[in-house]
Image (cartoon, helix red, strand yellow):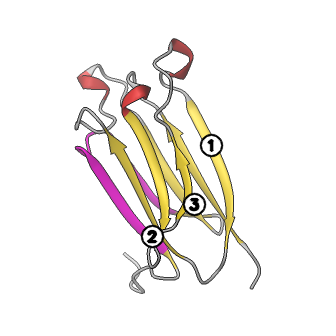
Amino acid sequence: GVPIPIQIDITTDGFPEETSWKIINGVTSASIATGGPYPDATEYKHLFITTSYEVCPSDCLNFTIFDTYSNGMNDNRRGRPGSYTIFYDNETIREGGDNFGKEESTIFGACAPSSVP
């Protein structure tokens, strides 16, 4: 089939070195894409980072975002939490951020639940 575009938008909080993410194939666990941890540098704090990929329409995808401090992207309560958005075929699949704890996963693509929230 025709490749499907996916896009991951990350806005870091004040602790970009704590944030990383990965997309794996939900069936085979093969790595599809990774991001972070980002440099502990001023220019990476509260930074918008976007990355795009193409996947097969038959791919089952599992996106997981991690925070090593286990407070998600809540900026240690300093008032500027980070966020992330997952796009699949140019549609928003998931928006998240702030305090998700240590990690948060979203399954999408060919294995996504058929019910629309």
Q: Residue 44: image x %, image y %?
A: 53, 22
Magenta: main secondary structure equals strand
Q: Is 102 rendered above or below residue 61?
A: above
Above or below, 112 against 20 in this view is below
Asked if residue 20 is positioned above or below residue 32 in the image, the reply reads: above
Badge 3 element? strand
Element carrying mark 2: loop
Q: Position of residue 74 (x, y in %)?
A: 29, 32
Q: Are marks 1 and 3 in contact (CB under 8 Å)?
A: no
Precedes in sequence: disc 3 or disc 2: 2
In the image, which disc is placed on residue 87? 3
* Amino acid bearing label 1: Thr
Real-space Cα separation, disc 1 to disc 3, in angstroms: 11 Å
- SS state under label 1: strand
Q: In 3D space, how far apart are the residues under numbered discs 1 and 2 (Cα atoms)?
A: 23 Å
Front residue of 115/58: it is 58
Would residue 97 be visible to someone looking at this image?
no
Dot 2, how many residues are within 10 Å of its Cα: few (below 14), some (14-19), or many (20+)?
few
30 or 3, nearer to the observer: 30
Q: Which residue is mark 2?
A: 29
Front label number (1 vs 2)? 2
Q: Amino acid at mark 2?
A: Ser
Kindly identify the residue that appears in the image at 40 percent across and 36 percent down. Answer: 19
Q: Which residues are magenta?
A: 93-108
